[in-house]
Image (cartoon, grey):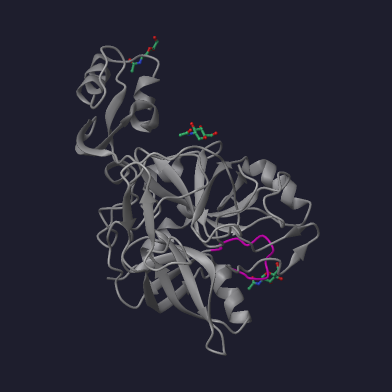
Amino acid sequence: MGSFSGRRTAAAVVLFLAVISSFSLRLTAQGTDNCISKTQNGRTTGNCISIKECEYFMKILSSVNLTQNDRILLRDNQCGVRSRDVPVQVCCPSTVGLGALALPLLPKNCGSVRWQRTNDTETRIKEFPWLALIEYTKASKEKIHACGGVLISNRYVLTAAHCVANAEADNLQISAVRLGEWDTSTNPDCQFDEQTKIVNCAPVYQDIGVEQVISHPLYNKTDLSQVNDIALIRLAQPAILNEFVEPICLPNKQLRADELEGLVTEVGGWQARSSSRMKKSTVTITSIEDCQEKYARQNLHIQASQLCGAANANECHGNAGGPLMLFKNGGYLLGGLVSFGPVPCPNPDWPDVYTRVTSYVDWIEGQLKA
Ligand SMILES: *[C@@H]1O[C@H](CO)[C@@H](O)[C@H](O)[C@H]1NC(C)=O
Ligand SMILES: *[C@@H]1O[C@H](CO)[C@@H](O)[C@H](O)[C@H]1NC(C)=O
Ligand SMILES: *[C@@H]1O[C@H](CO)[C@@H](O)[C@H](O)[C@H]1NC(C)=O
């Protein structure tokens, strides 16, 4: 899997790559249950998960003075494993019901979790069904995949603007987007489940033509800091959505204001040399001030519309243009897009830089057409 890496050097720092990391843990298959969650603002769909994983109820639980209403709310949302004191599992209001941007042109189902989350670097089939690969066609008609992207509706994929600009500079045409990919060496992709002894197969991937590529109007390819590194691709036909092809949720206004520093997020992609399967790793969002200071020494001016993250790994997994994923209240929201980072990657001294998607939600909204 190629990527636009090692193209340019800013002293020690080489830009334009695809980033990220590694861990080790056992995978266990387990979906989450749908339930109706009672919130302070009424009922919404939810997932029965551990209260520790549910930000909404953890916030209530950690408030200094828990009111009687809070106690009732917690009690009423107990589900699955029950206990008399603090609930073990709660019907956590879903990301869709709580944090996701709701627009007529965006899907109601997004960011679904289909497996128990782990810190492993292996992914399971349909774990991140919004991951996309951008197909480029050379003048010789040869086709290559060289950047990642992320599905946000059945018609739109987000990627990095540098994935568009560098292609133009290299006489490559963005010809299609691949969705529903997991193992690039097989089609269809199948996964053997150790526990059930069942082989789980996905439909064949979808290669969908591109109707329009919209780079952010303020993106400047020659600006080393790569501010506004975001582009929207409109597909020529709607993607067929299923468990293997599903959009991620975009964050709503409230979540846009949330502090992200310190948050453990995830990236996934096909950067691992050792595997043709999608790999993943966790990325901790680091201080923007430290990051600005660090990169300023290389004459790069990191902006508030960017995010810096440290990959918790010894190998990079995310493709440039691919998503930085925030897990909140039982679902995934799009937090960032892989923009650039150090080469070789990862490098503990140089954080990876992402486009902060929350800064561009209004721009995205303004571009969407039916
Ligand atoms: C919480 O407790 C503090 C001090 O005990 C009090 O001043 C405050 O009004 C309380 N807040 C609520 C929402 O009850
Ligand atoms: C994964 O790692 C993060 C950060 O180290 C930790 O907070 C989290 O609890 C771990 N999750 C699991 C399922 O072990
Ligand atoms: C793009 O960035 C370069 C380098 O910072 C600068 O010289 C140039 O004026 C910028 N172009 C535009 C259109 O802003």
Give the image location of residue 296, x and y in percent.
74, 51
- Quadrant assignment for ligand 1: top left
Q: Which residues are magenta?
A: 219-229
* Vertical placement of residue 117 versus 79, above or below: below
Quadrant of the image for the C terminus? bottom left
Residue at the far bottom in the pictured view: 140
What residue sits 73% from the left and 51% below the top? Answer: 295
Closer to us: 131 or 366: 131
On whether residue 211 falls in the magenta region, the answer is no
Give the image location of residue 318, x and y in percent.
55, 56
Quadrant of the image for the N terminus? bottom right
Closer to us: 272 or 161: 272
What residue sits 76% from the left and 64% below the top? Answer: 9
What residue sits 42% from the left and 70% below the top? Answer: 178
* Vertical placement of residue 83 versus 237, above or below: above
**In the displayed structure, does residue 283 sit left or right of residue 189?**
right
- State the image quarter where residue 327 is shown: top left
